Image (spheres, coloured by chain):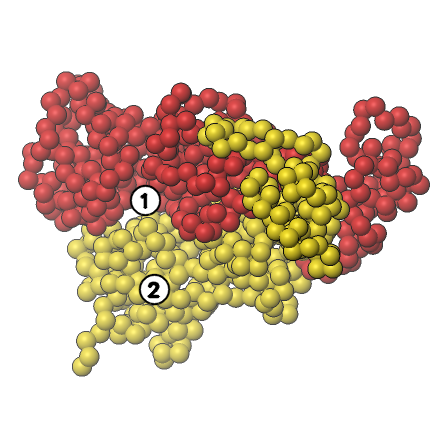
Chain colours: A yellow, B red
Amino acid sequence: MISQEKDPGTPATPDAPVGTSRAHPVTLREVAEAAGVSTATVSLVINKKKNARIADETRQRVKAAIQQLGYRPNAMAKTLVSGTSKFIGLVADGVATTPFAGQIIHGAQDEAWKHGYALLIANTEGNVDLENDAINMMLEYKVRGILYSTWFHRTTDIPETLREADFVLVNCFSPETSARAVVPNEAQGGQSATDVLIRGGHRRIAFINATTPAPARDGRLEGYKSALEAAGIAFDPDLVLEAFPDQEGGYGATKELLKHDITAVYCYNDRMAMGLYDGLRENGLSIPDDIAVVGFDNQEVIAAHVRPPLSTVSLPHYELGAAGVRLLLGLDQAPADSALQIECPAVERASVAVPSKA
Amino acid sequence: MISQEKDPGTPATPDAPVGTSRAHPVTLREVAEAAGVSTATVSLVINKKKNARIADETRQRVKAAIQQLGYRPNAMAKTLVSGTSKFIGLVADGVATTPFAGQIIHGAQDEAWKHGYALLIANTEGNVDLENDAINMMLEYKVRGILYSTWFHRTTDIPETLREADFVLVNCFSPETSARAVVPNEAQGGQSATDVLIRGGHRRIAFINATTPAPARDGRLEGYKSALEAAGIAFDPDLVLEAFPDQEGGYGATKELLKHDITAVYCYNDRMAMGLYDGLRENGLSIPDDIAVVGFDNQEVIAAHVRPPLSTVSLPHYELGAAGVRLLLGLDQAPADSALQIECPAVERASVAVPSKA
């Protein structure tokens, strides 16, 4: 039996000042004294030992004392026996402080709680020393494993300290393909975005890609090409432009875009589409009648609220977090030698007109 | 002495598969065997007992064995002795998944780490059962205290379980004024926003307030009035409009706004200002030359990237989180019977013209 507290204290008083430090928490010994049993008996009742022979009446008396005194077992003590805690660590380089990647936390937490684990989150903002400290702290708290996540989809090195834990890469992946990873399916997302425009009756579709190298840049272009091919539309490299992936980039691409004979644009992300909206308006063009627009990311604060609301493709951040936990706990399997890819579903709004049924 | 592990295991092998479960962690016993000392001696070296008389040579041998085997002390064990862990809990109703309130996490974590604490974050999405489970879990892990935070500034009830902990309300407050709380200074923020327009030479300034009751609605109006009064401008209730606090609300307020003889608008938030931009443009008006606009929140993805970039007032989410930790640890004090108020600084961009020096 492990005795949780060294010093017998006094029970919490109901008239203690609100939200300020109080006396010691209730101890196992106090419960034992109140119930008139040994501390060993209290421990057996708390830990629900099956083989322990305790009279029902005694068990009830202990439970009543626990309730009356407000005793709480020490979760830390359990980890000494089991060797691991009921924590899953989440190391994030900016997930918690980035507009929409916070859903990685939401998904990871929901899935973790389902299986009796709590999330221990460290937000490192990409600081290597802080990251090392965070991983060391998690190892000292004997976490079941660590989700190592990035706020945008990218390749990553695996920190040496991380190798001491059971880990899964979330929204990033390593050239070491044996490391388990879960990432968004950029190519499928790009195909879905282009398909929204093709279903809208468009065949001259431009793609404004990002200038910055990233898996998203390659995958979203690949998906654009696949969609065109599946619809029997010839790929025209002149219709692929490039711009910095923000509002200013989209706005700045307007002039070049309008040199081409097109009826629709698929933008690398929603921020770019928001800037393009301003550029098209300044040229007296209306969306979707003159030009249809599709984005990528489904960044809610933008996509759902520009005029007209933007059709886009959703980055599955919630699902990435949840799938990361399932991979870690062995409930899902990643394919051998590659990352698990999560679907990016299309979200259709008013920036693409529905074709009239002829 | 507390023996951290029950079963002697095998040390981590460098050729273990990357990121998958491995053998048992290195035990205290293995360190003792490698160093040729007792487990008690290893424990004394690890815990840096001052009165322990251990030869320097022995101490070095133990340290070498710890490093060679990659032994990690169990942080959980320490909490059994000290009674509290080095955790601070953060209960959030949506902070981690809201565009900009995630900075509360960032600020709380930076401050917590500074003082040797790690954050244990639970995101409840406002679910009462989940919230209770989260607080109970934190109590079982013997957290030093709990920050109870909300993603928008509001009043809150204090959950009964929370009263068992040392706690601070962050971005919310209770009618029970004895509960420590830290909130943004809405009135000062509203005054700063209005001052940006007054300094820009404007005297006919409309305010589009929110329709939804909130401390921000009262405080931001109060600040508007104070700024006018300080500048000797008579308050005209006709110039205070109301709209739903999002893009559609701001857009919809345009028509009513343009009935008044004004040169500047202060919007309740940035989302509203973004919608108003569209409405003003459709009426052929240019910002800032025809109408100057100021928002509130400094929601980066909007304010820094609309055309022209929006002057606004920053919600001090990072500071709220940091101040919450300092209040909890007793490093800062809240005023008696009221919440600690944090300044909302003005962020000036191009939506208000700088007056020419005459």
| Count of all numbered marks drawn on residues in the image | 2
Q: Nearer the viewer, residue B347 or B79?
A: B79
Q: Locate the C terminus of chain B by quadrant.
A: top left
Marks 1 and 2, Cα distance to the nearest angstrom? 21 Å
Q: Residue furthest right?
A: B36
Judged from the image, the secondary structure of the residue bearing numbered disc 1 is: helix
Judged from the image, the secondary structure of the residue bearing numbered disc 2 is: strand
Q: Is residue B192 left or right of residue B1?
A: left
Identity of the residue drawn at 22% across and 74% down? A355
Residue type at mark 1?
Answer: Ile
Residue A247, how many percent across, how many down?
33, 49
Identity of the residue drawn at 43% across and 73% down? A226
Q: Residue furthest bottom?
A: A358
Q: Is residue A345 left or right of residue A140?
A: left
Residue on which disc 1 sits: B302
Q: Is residue A217 left or right of residue B307?
A: right
Q: Nearer the viewer, residue A98 or A338?
A: A98
Q: Nearer the viewer, residue A157 or B318?
A: B318
Residue type at mark 2?
Answer: Val
Residue on which disc 2 sits: A347
Chain under callout 2:
A
Q: Nearer the viewer, residue B254 or A293?
A: B254
Residue B75, how many percent across, how many down?
69, 40
Is any atom of residue A344 visible in this view? yes
**Residue B177 drawn above or below residue B16:** above
Do the dots labelled 1 and 2 sit on one chain? Answer: no
Q: Are marks 1 and 2 in contact (CB under 8 Å)?
A: no
Residue A296, how many percent across, how many down?
38, 59
**Residue B188 drawn above or below residue A184:** above
Identity of the residue drawn at 17% across and 34% down? B207
Identity of the residue drawn at 71% across and 34% down? A6
